[in-house]
Every structure is written in structure tokens, then in C-alpha cells.
């Protein structure tokens, strides 16, 4: 069910992460692409809904998977002021443990989102969970709290009345928290062992819900690519210093997709940047106003880039030229980003409809659908032959049941 | 015998325990003390369920970081205990809950633990929570009362239902419950004064407009920030401006600058009122505002925030302050920006004075009535 590749070699990540683990927003590489094979395609609830477990709170963060454990965040309580981290058994969906903390920052957010909007990240040993309130908890995989931060307590104007949503990323031993908003806007690089600030840089005073991309070069050097309305800032994760800046603006909801040395930025539609091998430069290769990601982030698979707009139209383009090859109308709207595995694109609509697109079909083809009956706004996790997706009330495992 | 937060730790107390608790309570902002706290928590989490009341007690007066660390220990101990079929110290948890000298958060957590261990025991405690300082706990009691009131209403016992709804409204602090109860009372033909229930301030003096070109007005110190005397005149956007009396009849106390000044853009306005406190006391100014704003109490800046049109709700901002006995001057600055979308028309705020539970504190008298309108 999985290619026997150590993600650790690919991602330069910690030794606790292995092939098949889904370790952060849009997976271990942050691009939504999985090397899993054999996922179900022609979906049916009878054959593929392996388990469904009720969650104690709301959320639209993506699940994570480490080995046989699934992690998901949620928020509960009348005022959504109980921050929850839940660990489930991947095999049967039973709850291994649940931890709940008091909110320290603001719970205010738009009714469509929730306090558990950002996706956690893990290095395979420790789990880092942040919430819209800018409260950050580090737990081991057995649910023991290691450290915490209350970033809105520390920086009281760091909040957004619509809610925050940028997910955490790990760059080596640095945990990057993107806390961008109209007022006290910043990004902090935290020591992942202690939570203390290694650096903190001012950011554009503008609401931003994107998630950073981590570029990992062959030599082990890493860069954090921060997206905002001001474009892309490439930041050295050790120092927080800006290395280069693409200054032509970018979207503040869909995030960029990195594939090799190409960065596909939601900017003036979609803009392809070729990143220099020296880590100091970039070159714009093409730009297309016809590829305009909506809420969902673009995704690259093979030599093609896919963009899902707010009308629910999936467009496929050539990565080298940006020329649109085909487009396919899906049943939207979409609040979460798609994932790709084994030549199929999986995406869940806000209506709860799972849709599977065969990317090998000449113009793409929807080959599977399954109605989960609840609003889905997350990007699914892909791990060990299964998809994991959550709503405000439940989390599902979707897989071939015979492959338990 | 060690005491933390006023509760002896009893047998749970030993030097290691006390040091670990002290370590957790010493954590500070920006992750200060995190490393030591993680180790201390590991030690505490190995304790048995009998240590839970002491850990809850240690949350009294703790900062929010420390309270969450301590909660982390309780979460592990209680989770492991119940998972292994063990029992929690119900009596001690109940006694902790019933002792209102403890902080509200650990008391609410004690209730949650009791409910997880013995739902019926928790249910029996609910009637006594109607006036509890914990908003979470009193919500439980209000919910119960609402169920009883609905039963009476369905049985056509209108007087009984009205009186129960009145009790529920008096106790309710959550907006959803308050709105539900007031709707039921009005359906039953009774009047409800929500403005007074919340304690919204409705009588103000306003002055403006001043500029907010390029959103620069937020930082600029206009005349009212230097001299808020009601007789003062200032250089406004288009000549001299002075204070005008303004009262809102909005049920939720909305002070709408668009009413006296029109739907302007890139402007700044000020509102001032006097609040007469019966005593020196802590209080909260609770603000809802979707414009950039600043608030001063008795000439001291309380807080400010330069966010525009991201949303507004009752009690959006809870600002702890110290009221002084007698007259207190509250000055609010509200800035409107340049956006043109229909959802950016609002140039307004709502403000109430209450205690930490959200119970309205009312001004002793309305001094504004004496203010001559310009």
C-alpha cells in the first residue's frame, strides 16, 4: 500500500517519520502529493467507509497520521474555548487519548471556520498543535504536554476577528508559526524543543490564512517560503532573515505548491517561479490568469499542475508552459485542498461529497463519488492505503476494507 | 503541610510535588520556564487520582500558561485512571467545586471530571450552580431551568413558566441563552430589557469627524485625546467641531457614528461618557467593534486595535480595568477606513461595563443628562 521509501530521506525530517505518515498540512512535503498506491477509487460507503468516529468538538484542520495513530484537533465548549487534541487508533477509529486545554487567545472567527482551523505538524516524535486563538501546544504522541505557548497572550494584538488558519511547518529544529493579521502581524521561529523564540519578524499588516512552504535542498539546506499579499518571502529558518522576495503579490487563502525547484504561487492567477540552485534567487517562468485557485491550493503531479477555482472547475495545465490542457467541472464548493495519490485526485466538497478524478483520462474524469453527508472543509490525509477526512462532527477512514 | 491557592494539599503534598507545582506556576510569557515546566509536568502526571484536587487548587491565581500546564497533568492522570477502570475522588472533587473561593476554571474542570466519572452525581449538583461565578457552571443550571420552564409552558402553566424564565434570565450570561429566554418571555407577553440586562452604555457625547486618510488617524492624536472636556472645540475634518449629545435606542447599545455624521469614509470619531461607580472595584469594559478603536478610562489608554471590518460581536474584547469610586470617564475612538463594500459601511461600537462573569455593573446615575448638547 505504500512505496517503501523513507520520507526521512526525502524530507530531511526527523527519524520518527516514515513512509506512509502524513505529518502536516498537505502531507510530509506540504504539497498534497502522496506516494501511496491502491487507494479506493470507485467509492462506496459499504466497501470503503472503514470507520467513522464522533469528534468531541468542531474543526477543519486536517488529520495527521503517524504509524497506527491518527491525530486531529478540535474545539469544544459553548464558547469554543476548549482546545482539544485527539489521538485515534488507525485500525478501528477508537480514541487512544484526548487532551483538552483552555483557550488563552481569541475564539472569535467567521461562522464557516472554527478555532481548530490550522493543521498541526509532527516530526514523528512530538506533535505541535496550534489553534486560531494562537495557542500552541507541544505533546508527545502519548498525549503528554511538553510545552505550550499563548501567542496572543504574549502579543495581544495578534488576532483576527475572522479567525486565523495558517498551519505550522517544521524546518529542521525550527517550528515556524505564521501569525499574520491586520494588526500585530508576525512570523516566529520557535525552538521545537522548548517553544522559545529563536526569532520573530514583522510581517505585512494584513490578514493571511496561507501556510508556508518548506524548501529542502539536496544539501540539507532549508528555506521557509512565506506567502502573503506582498508575495513570497524566502526566509532562512535559522535566523529569520529574508533571503529573497518575489514582490508581485499573492493570494492570502490558497497556498503555494512546491514541486522540485518549481514553486507555483497563487499570484495573478497562477505564477510559476523557478527557484535558483543557489538558494538566493528565482526566475518567473510563466503566469496564467486562467488558472486561478479559489480556496483550495494548487497541486502538482507529474508534469501537470492542477488548480481548483471557486466555481468548482478543476483546470489542468502543463507545468513548463502554464498552457491549460483541460478543465473539468466538479461538484463544489470547496473549502479544503485536494490531494493526489496513484494518479487520482481526491477532493471533498463543502457538501460532504468525496470526488475522485482519474488524472490519466485525456481530459480528467470523475471516477468515484461518495456522500459523507456533512460539511467537509479540510484537506484529507493519505496514509497506509487510506484517506482520513474530518467534519465538525466526525472523522472517517476511507480505504479498501480488506486491507485493514 | 503545603497550601497552594488556599487549599492544603494533604497527603498529596511532598517536596517533589510542591516543587513541581511551583515550577509550573513560575512559567511566564514567550515560553519562559517551558523546559523546566515540561519536566515538572512529567513528574506530576505520574501521580494518582488523589492528587487531582491539589492540582486543581494549584490553579488558583495561576497565569493562563501555568493553569494549562496544570490542566495537562490532570488530563493525563484522569484519562489514565478512567481508562484503567479506576475511580476519581468524587467527594473531594465535589467539595472543591462547591468551594467558591477557588478560581472558576478549575471548579468547572472539577465539575467536568465529576460528570465523566458519575453523570448522576454531577446532575445532582446542577441546581446549586444558578448564581455561580463560573459562567460555564451557571450555564448548566440555566439549561436545567429552561427545560423546566418549557415543560410548564407546554402544560399551559403560563405564570409558572414566566417566573422560571425570569429566574433563568437573571442567571444567564451567555448570549444564546439570553436571547432564547427573552424570546420565550416576549412570546408569553412579558417585557424584557436586554439593554439593562447586559449593561450597555447608551448615553454618550460624540465628536467628529476627524480624518483617517490612509488609516493614519488611528495613530494621530486628535484634540479629544488631549482635552476631552465637553466644552472643548477641536479642528475637525471640515472646520471646528464640538461634542454632541448622542443616545442610542438600539437594544444592544450600538453607538452608530453614521447617524450624526453620515456614512463617511476615512474618518475618525470619538464618544465619551461618564460612569458613576459605587465603589473602587475591578471591572471589565466589554467592547464590540469592527472598526479600528482605542479606549481610555480616566485619561489612561486601556487598549487599542487597528483592524477593520473583520467582524463584530458582543463582548468581542474583554478589557480588565479598575473603576474608581465616583465618576469615571470613558473615551472611545473609532476609525472608519476607505473600503467601499457594503459590509464596510458600519462605523460603530457597543460597550458595556460588567464584572468578570459578565454581570452588568450599572452606573449610579446618568450624568450625561446634564451635558448641554452643542
Image (spheres, grey):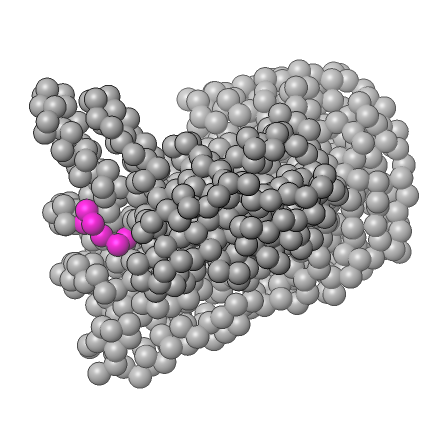
Task: Count every numbered label the image shows and give the total.
Answer: 0
Q: Identify the residue at image location x=32%, y=77%.
A: B17
Quarter occupied by the N terminus of chain B: bottom left
**Does the magenta run of residues contain B130?**
yes
| x and y, in percent, of residue B168 in the image | 20, 38
Q: Position of residue A259 (x, y in %)?
A: 77, 41
| In this picture, residue B248 sits left or right of residue B150 | right
Magenta stretch, overall SS:
loop
Quadrant location of residue A119?
top right
Residue B313 on the magenta span: no
Can you say whether A298 is above or below A315 in the image?
below
Q: Quadrant of the C terminus of chain B?
A: top right
Instruction: Tell whether A170 sits left or right of B200.
Output: right
- Tell me the magenta residue range: B129-134
Residue at position x 46%, y 55% in the image? B329
Q: Is residue B313 visible to the viewer in this orientation of the structure?
A: no
Q: Nearer the viewer, residue B16 or B299?
A: B299
Q: Nearer the viewer, residue A204 or A299?
A: A204
Task: Give coordinates of residue A348: x percent, y percent.
Answer: 55, 27
Horizontal side of A38 relative to B362 (left or right) equals right
State whether residue A248 appears in this view. yes
Residue positioned 89% across, 51% down in the render: A281
**Residue A237 position (above or below residue A130):** below
Q: Name the foreground residue: B256 vs B237.
A: B237
Amino acid at each position: 500500500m505504500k512505496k517503501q521509501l523513507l520520507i526521512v530521506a526525502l524530507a530531511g525530517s526527523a527519524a520518527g517519520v516514515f513512509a506512509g505518515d502524513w505529518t502536516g498540512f498537505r502531507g510530509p512535503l506540504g504539497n498534497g502529493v502522496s506516494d501511496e498506491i491502491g487507494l479506493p477509487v470507485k467509492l462506496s460507503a459499504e466497501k470503503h467507509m472503514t470507520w467513522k468516529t464522533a469528534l468531541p468538538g468542531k474543526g477543519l484542520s486536517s488529520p495527521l497520521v503517524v504509524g497506527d495513530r491518527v491525530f486531529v484537533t478540535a474545539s469544544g465548549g459553548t464558547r469554543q474555548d476548549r482546545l482539544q487534541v485527539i489521538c485515534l487508533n488507525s485500525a478501528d477509529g477508537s480514541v487512544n487519548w484526548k487532551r483538552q486545554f483552555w483557550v488563552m487567545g481569541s475564539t472569535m472567527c467567521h461562522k464557516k471556520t472554527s478555532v481548530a482551523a490550522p493543521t498541526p505538524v509532527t516530526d514523528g516524535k512530538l506533535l505541535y498543535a496550534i489553534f486560531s486563538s494562537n495557542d500552541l501546544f507541544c505533546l508527545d504522541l502519548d498525549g503528554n504536554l511538553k510545552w505550550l505557548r499563548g501567542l496572543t497572550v504574549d502579543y495581544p494584538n495578534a488576532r483576527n476577528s475572522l479567525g486565523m488558519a495558517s498551519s505550522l511547518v517544521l524546518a529542521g529544529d525550527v517550528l515556524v508559526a505564521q501569525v499574520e493579521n491586520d494588526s500585530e502581524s508576525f512570523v516566529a521561529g520557535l525552538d521545537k524543543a522548548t517553544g522559545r523564540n529563536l526569532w520573530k519578524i514583522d510581517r505585512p499588516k494584513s490578514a493571511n490564512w496561507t501556510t508556508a512552504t518548506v524548501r529542502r535542498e539536496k544539501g540539507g539546506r532549508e528555506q521557509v517560503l512565506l506567502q502573503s499579499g506582498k508575495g513570497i518571502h524566502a526566509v532562512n529558518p535559522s535566523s529569520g532573515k529574508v533571503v529573497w522576495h518575489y514582490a508581485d503579490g499573492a493570494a492570502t487563502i490558497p497556498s503555494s505548491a512546491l514541486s522540485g525547484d518549481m514553486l507555483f504561487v497563487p499570484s495573478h492567477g497562477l505564477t510559476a517561479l523557478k527557484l535558483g540552485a543557489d538558494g538566493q534567487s528565482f526566475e518567473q517562468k510563466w503566469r496564467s490568469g486562467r488558472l486561478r485557485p479559489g480556496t483550495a491550493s494548487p497541486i502538482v503531479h507529474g508534469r501537470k499542475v492542477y488548480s481548483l477555482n471557486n466555481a468548482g472547475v478543476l483546470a489542468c495545465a502543463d507545468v513548463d508552459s502554464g498552457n491549460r490542457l483541460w478543465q473539468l467541472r466538479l461538484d463544489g464548493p470547496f473549502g479544503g485542498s485536494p490531494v493526489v495519490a496513484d494518479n487520482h485526485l481526491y477532493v471533498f466538497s463543502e457538501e460532504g461529497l468525496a470526488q475522485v478524478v482519474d488524472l490519466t483520462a485525456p481530459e480528467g474524469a470523475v471516477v468515484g463519488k461518495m456522500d459523507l453527508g456533512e460539511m467537509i472543509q479540510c484537506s484529507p490525509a493519505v496514509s497506509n492505503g487510506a484517506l482520513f477526512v474530518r467534519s465538525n462532527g466526525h472523522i472517517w477512514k476511507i480505504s479498501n476494507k480488506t486491507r485493514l | 503541610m503545603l497550601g497552594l491557592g488556599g487549599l492544603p494539599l494533604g497527603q498529596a503534598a511532598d517536596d517533589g510535588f510542591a516543587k513541581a507545582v511551583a515550577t509550573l506556576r513560575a512559567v511566564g510569557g514567550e515560553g519562559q520556564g517551558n523546559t523546566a515546566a515540561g519536566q515538572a509536568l512529567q513528574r506530576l502526571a505520574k501521580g494518582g487520582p488523589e492528587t487531582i484536587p491539589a492540582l486543581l487548587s494549584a490553579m488558583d491565581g495561576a497565569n493562563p500558561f501555568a493553569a494549562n500546564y496544570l490542566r495537562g497533568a490532570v488530563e493525563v492522570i484522569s484519562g489514565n485512571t478512567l481508562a484503567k477502570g479506576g475511580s476519581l475522588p468524587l467527594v473531594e472533587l465535589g467539595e472543591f467545586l462547591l468551594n467558591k473561593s477557588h478560581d472558576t476554571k478549575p471548579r468547572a474542570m472539577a465539575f467536568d471530571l465529576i460528570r465523566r466519572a458519575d453523570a448522576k452525581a454531577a446532575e445532582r449538583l446542577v441546581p446549586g450552580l444558578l448564581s455561580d461565578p463560573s459562567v460555564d457552571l451557571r450555564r448548566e443550571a440555566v439549561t436545567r431551568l429552561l427545560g423546566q420552564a418549557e415543560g410548564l409552558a407546554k402544560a399551559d402553566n403560563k405564570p409558572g413558566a414566566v417566573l422560571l424564565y425570569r429566574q433563568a434570565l437573571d442567571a444567564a450570561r451567555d448570549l444564546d441563552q439570553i436571547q432564547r429566554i427573552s424570546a420565550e418571555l416576549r412570546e408569553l407577553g412579558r417585557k424584557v430589557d436586554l439593554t439593562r440586562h447586559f449593561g450597555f452604555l447608551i448615553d454618550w457625547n460624540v465628536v467628529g469627524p476627524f480624518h483617517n486618510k490612509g488609516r493614519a488617524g488611528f495613530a494621530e492624536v486628535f484634540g479629544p485625546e488631549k482635552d476631552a472636556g465637553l466644552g472643548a472645540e477641536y479642528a475637525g475634518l471640515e472646520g471646528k467641531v464640538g461634542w454632541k449629545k448622542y443616545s442610542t435606542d438600539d437594544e444592544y447599545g450600538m453607538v452608530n457614528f453614521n447617524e450624526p455624521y453620515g456614512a463617511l469614509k476615512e474618518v475618525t470619531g470619538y464618544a465619551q461618557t461618564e460612569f458613576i461607580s459605587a465603589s473602587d472595584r475591578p471591572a471589565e469594559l466589554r467592547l464590540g467593534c469592527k472598526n479600528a478603536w482605542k479606549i481610555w478610562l480616566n485619561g489612561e489608554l486601556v487598549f487599542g486595535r487597528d483592524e477593520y471590518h473583520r467582524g463584530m460581536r458582543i463582548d468581542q474584547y474583554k478589557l480588565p480595568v479598575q473603576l474608581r469610586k465616583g465618576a469615571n470617564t470613558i473615551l472611545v475612538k473609532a476609525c472608519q477606513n476607505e473600503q467601499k463594500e457594503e459590509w464596510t459601511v458600519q462605523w460603530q461600537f457597543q460597550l458595556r461595563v460588567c464584572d468578570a462573569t459578565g454581570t452588568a455593573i450599572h452606573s449610579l446615575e446618568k450624568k450625561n443628562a446634564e451635558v448641554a448638547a452643542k
